[in-house]
Image (tube, rainbow, N blue to C red):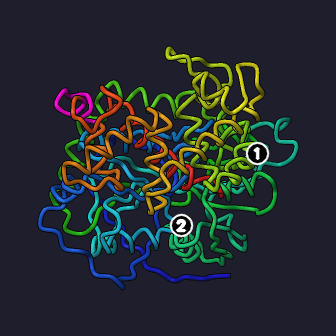
Amino acid sequence: MLYINLVVIMFKAQSYLFPLFLLLITSCSFQDRRTEPVKLENDLEQIRTRGKLVVLTDYSSTDYFIYRGQPMGFQYEMLQQLANHLAVRLEVQVSRSLEESFEMLRSGEADLIAQNLTVTIGRLDFMDFTTPFIQSRQVLVQRKPENWVKMKENELKGKLVSSPTGLKNKTLYVVKGSAYVSRIQHLSEEIGGEIRLFEVDKSAEKLIEQVAEGDIPFTVCDEITAKVNSRYYPNLDFSTPVSVKQDLAWGVRKGSTTFVQALNQWLEGFTQSKKYHNIYSRYFESNRSATIVESDFYAINTGKISPFDDYIRKYSSDLGWDWRLVASLIYQESRFKTNVTSWKGAWGLMQLMPVTARRFGVDTISSARDQIRAGTQFIKWLNKHYNDIGDPEERIKFVLAAYNVGPGHVDDARNLAGKNGADPDKWDDNVAVFLLNKSEPQYYNDPVVKHGYCRGTETFNYVTQVLERYEHYKNIVAE
């Protein structure tokens, strides 16, 4: 049991009510300053020079999740649009706690916390906020009586905690370190009675689920989270507010002036666009989100990426690769469809060409299991072909490229790299550059090139997308 006495001074920022970001995690009031904020002369320019935007978020049924092998989520799609606008690559990291997120932000390990952060004066000591994009109250989550369907509205209300005073001597479970902690402690003082408070290392959605199942009596979440989860749990009541409305925003490192200005400018324009409203509608005005959560391939709940995970695990183990990397490759090839055929004649889950398929003992009527076995055997052969590349992570990039375009074109690019003073054993900024250049006559006519013209853009994007999706799988799906 944990009791925290905090005086919460609310910072009332000017409210800009964009119909934006119905996100799920309300932030905590952590104010530890073990690491001084990194000082940046031009934070936005550094992000662009680096070519990568590092964002901390949490996974949930709307923000960020994997469904049927594809990273999805309202927040994820918004962040991808932001990265495209900035012309940088998006790197999403899942934070284990808000304390960790704040520390990573201050130390310079991350550029942005894309979660619902309550704007408070205390936090302004170590971070800056974007323009507040929405307001939300904290609400009580409680289970309705067993026979609630047969009750009239007034009768049902009489069975529920309908005001904060009804929480006297009650026990609440809330997200550890969240703003809910300080609010409930403050509420206990306001009503003049003890509220027993437990902080736990679980998400707001997980606690809501536990209330629905009867494992815990009460929790607290914000109205945004309540709106989404009310679709999944009709036996829960979210109607009792326990706080006034609070401003919510994204957080950046203290002093990130040019970055936060760019964020605010982008938010103001993008939230008025048709693309934004389509994303918003997809996650918050459609019943599809409830269908996704109940699916066997909603990875947060089930840990499953595809119907073929067991086979992928088995043959990836024989290969010596992380099964989630192989799953990402298969998604890239076929979207986990067993009967697709490309215009080039490649077919099945692993999109093997007929010659390669025959070499490894499969054909168009082979089972999914045999297709995955044959595909991983081909990967194993490619891995051996590039055994001279000592760095295993670099070798993976070459194997992926060769799986897409064939080892001949990749070998040509390595020869071009060596001839032109680049490193033939490194992919990024070295061999990849010359594979891209193989569409130019001066390169595909070079004497060291044995396999002629190649449109390298497709292969370059293939390697990038497989590896990026693999990172998303690692964020959410257990090894």
> What's the magenta bit mostly, secondary-structure-wise?
helix
- Please state the horizontal and vertical placement of residue 188, each as a whole percent of the image: 59, 74
Which amino acid, mark 2?
Answer: Arg
Q: Secondary structure at mark 2?
A: loop
Left or right side of 99 for 153 = right
- Which residue in the structure is indicated by mark 1? 310
Residue 200 at least partly seen: yes
In the rendered view, tell whether residue 24 sits above or below residue 329.
Answer: below
Query: Tag on residue 427?
Result: none
Query: What distance separates the C-alpha of mark 1 from that of mark 2?
Result: 27 Å
Nearer to us in this view, 286 or 163 = 286
- Which residue in the structure is indicated by mark 2? 96
For the point 27% across and 54% down, the residue is 130
Is residue 399 a member of the stretch shown in magenta?
no
- Please state the horizontal and vertical placement of residue 245, each as a whole percent of the image: 43, 54
- Please state the horizontal and vertical placement of residue 102, each as a whole percent of the image: 39, 71
